[in-house]
Amino acid sequence: MKKVLLVFSIVFTLVGILTSCNAQSPGGSDLKPNDFKAHVDQTNVQLLDVRTPEEYSAGHIKGSVNLDWYDAAFKTKAATLDKSKPVYVYCAVGGRSAQAKNLLQSLGFTSVFNLSGGIEAWKKMNLPIEK
């Protein structure tokens, strides 16, 4: 009986260690609009809108910087962002920002978060837009 309890204890300890390491690992994830907003509101972040300038001027999240994903110099401009700060990225529906997130991670950014569903999902939640 003691051996069984010891085995269970070891297994639960290992599971706990592995789970906590995964939860704390840098990288980022896709966040739903309310979670994305909560993170942006509570921390010192870089908020990046990767839509076209025309899309950006039609309405954007307050505090965001526009860096057009389709701009030939996107990668060069993105590389100038501060790698020590988290980057929160969004586009219209999530496709371009997911690609931008992957690119930023390949450039060495360790905390990059994508707005799941893009600004369209943000609007559906009646979250604020700035023009």
Image (spheres, grey):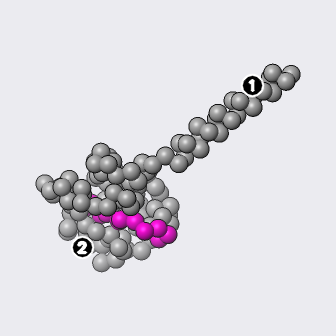
Frontmost residue, 72 versus 13: 13
Q: Residue furthest bottom?
A: 131
Q: Is residue 69 visible?
A: no
Q: Position of residue 94 (x, y in %)?
A: 34, 53
Q: Decide: is 67 above or below 62.
A: above
For mark 2, what is the residue? 57
Amino acid under label 1?
Val
Q: Quadrant of the C terminus?
A: bottom left
Give the side of residue 91 with respect to residue 70, left or right: right
For mark 1, what is the residue? 7
Disc 1 versus disc 2: nearer the observer:
1
Q: State the separation of the CA atoms marked 1 and 2.
A: 60 Å
Residue at point 49%, 69% (across, down)? 42
Residue at point 47%, 67% (across, down)? 43
Q: Which residues are magenta?
A: 41-51
Residue at point 32%, 61% (across, down)? 82
Q: Position of residue 3 (x, y in %)?
A: 81, 21
Residue 120's disc is none
Amino acid under label 2?
Ser
Q: Position of residue 47 (x, y in %)?
A: 35, 65
Q: Secondary structure at mark 2?
A: helix
Q: Quadrant of the N terminus?
A: top right
Q: Secondary structure at mark 1?
A: helix
Tell me where residue 16 sits by quadrant.
top right
Residue at point 13%, 54% (across, down)? 72
Q: Is residue 42 magenta?
A: yes
Q: Decide: is 122 above or below 25.
A: below
Q: Is residue 27 visible?
A: yes
Frontmost residue, 42 versus 127: 42
Q: Decide: is 17 above or below 94.
A: above
